[in-house]
Image: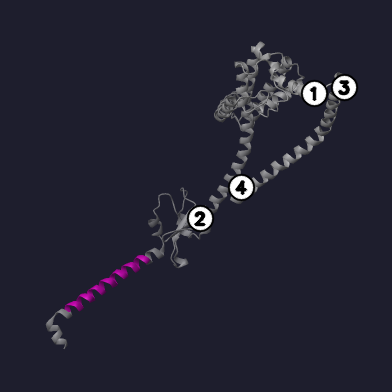
């Protein structure tokens, strides 16, 4: 069983690295050419601007740094309460867009401490919400099955996966529509943003609440974005947990089958307990007498017989029942009776030896008897 587990673990490692290699090859083929075109076009635009406005390389780098650092402030003040709450949410949920980062030593220190304590808290919260969501989904599934009078009115893991995945899909589609409206993104880009956010990948190439001072002027949009992230993460976490649980269940089922096979092998093995051997019923020769007398009573699957070398023709075996005592079962064995007879003979022999020793002692201690013998 341990060998099978090692092989399964090695297979998972190989599959993971194979998946990584496959992803790298596909991303290289899909994005590499477009990256070269975009970079060449960007450099051409820089040279055109430099020639038109007579800008030096040093001034161009300064302008680029200013434009890059100005981007986060287009959404408003990032470190006011609304912006700070949004930042804390991205830290605790491990999304980490990177749209705004602390610049002071105290801010960086507190970010590390806050993440160290907040990430486990967030994981526990999302797991608890996902668990309640799964229980609620199970309740709804059972009610629906009873309503349609299904034969099996039980919510299976497959049913839960379908329901929770459908709920996550609906949330993603609805959230994408809202972000497309507020951010003026295409619907496909909004779907992409929702997926990257709810899976906590958080590239940061597209970040909500970063346009038109949304953090300061659109409180309803800020509230929607935060609720979407928190509740959406719980739903997606529930869906992913069910999928992972299904894979783990398959692994556990294999282990249970191995354990059942080991128990069956142990059950079919002959056991020695003192002078009683217990073995499988099908492995013993039963007497015709006991076969006829067995009747229809409940019997165990094992039989007992004496472990000594007795005459097979006189060996009597019968299935052991739950009420049988081992000594009582063994009393039917001819060898057990022979053992008792031998025990009695041994005790008698011991008595004769003791009697002989007593006579010798009396003889040696009697003066008349000694003189007579001399």
124 relative to 269, above or below:
above
235 or 72: which is nearer to us? Answer: 72
Q: Which residues are magenta?
A: 339-362
2 relative to 110, above or below:
below
How many angstroms separate mark 1 from mark 3 (CA)? 11 Å
Q: Secondary structure at mark 1?
A: helix
Numbered circle sitting on residue 5 = 4
Image point 24% across, 73% down: which residue?
A: 354
Q: Earlier in the sequence, mark 4 or mark 1?
A: 4
Q: Which residue is mark 1?
A: 60
Image point 38% across, 67% down: which residue?
A: 338
Q: Secondary structure at mark 3?
A: helix
Tell me residue 63's x, y (percent).
Answer: 77, 21
Image point 84% across, 24% down: which residue?
A: 46
173 relative to 216, above or below:
below
Numbered circle sitting on residue 155 = none
Outermost residue to the top:
217
How many angstroms separate mark 3 from mark 2 (CA)? 99 Å
Numbered circle sitting on residue 281 = 2
How many angstroms separate mark 4 from mark 1 (CA)? 59 Å
Q: Earlier in the sequence, mark 1 or mark 2?
A: 1
Q: Earlier in the sequence, mark 4 or mark 2?
A: 4
CB within 8 Å, label 1 to label 3: no
Residue mark closest to the camera, 4 vs 2: 4
């Amino acid at each position: 069983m341990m060998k099978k587990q090692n092989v399964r673990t090695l297979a998972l490692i190989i599959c993971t690295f194979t998946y990584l290699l496959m992803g790298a090859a596909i991303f290289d083929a899909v994005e590499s050419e477009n990256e070269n075109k975009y970079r060449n076009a960007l450099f051409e635009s820089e040279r055109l601007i430099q020639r038109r406005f007579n800008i030096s390389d040093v001034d161009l780098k300064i302008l680029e740094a200013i434009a890059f650092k100005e981007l986060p402030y287009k959404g408003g003040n990032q470190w006011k309460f609304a912006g700070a709450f949004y930042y804390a949410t991205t830290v605790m949920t491990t999304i980490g867009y990177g749209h705004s980062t602390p610049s002071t030593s105290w801010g960086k220190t507190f970010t590390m401490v806050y993440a160290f304590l907040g990430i486990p808290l967030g994981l526990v919260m999302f797991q608890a919400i996902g668990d309640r969501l799964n229980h609620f989904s199970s309740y709804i599934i059972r009610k629906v099955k009873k309503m349609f009078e299904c034969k099996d009115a039980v919510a299976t893991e497959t049913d839960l996966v379908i329901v929770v995945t459908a709920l996550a899909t609906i949330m993603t589609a609805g959230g994408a529509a809202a972000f497309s409206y507020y951010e003026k993104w295409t619907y496909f880009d909004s779907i992409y943003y929702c997926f990257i956010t709810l899976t906590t990948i958080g590239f940061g190439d597209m970040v909500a609440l970063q346009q038109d001072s949304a953090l300061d002027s659109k409180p309803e949009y800020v509230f929607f974005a935060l609720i979407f992230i928190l509740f959406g993460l719980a739903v997606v976490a529930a869906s992913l947990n069910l999928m992972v649980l299904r894979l783990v269940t398959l692994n556990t089922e294999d282990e249970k089958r191995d354990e059942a096979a080991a128990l069956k092998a142990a059950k079919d093995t002959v056991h020695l307990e003192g002078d009683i051997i217990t073995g499988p019923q099908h492995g013993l020769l039963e007497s015709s007498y006991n076969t006829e007398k067995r009747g229809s009573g409940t019997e165990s699957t094992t039989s007992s017989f004496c472990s000594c070398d007795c005459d097979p023709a006189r060996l009597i075996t019968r299935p052991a029942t739950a009420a049988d005592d081992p000594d009582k079962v063994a009393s039917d064995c001819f060898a057990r009776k022979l053992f008792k007879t031998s025990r009695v003979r041994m005790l008698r022999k011991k008595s004769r030896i003791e009697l002989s020793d007593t006579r010798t002692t009396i003889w040696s201690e009697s003066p008349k008897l000694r003189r007579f013998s001399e």
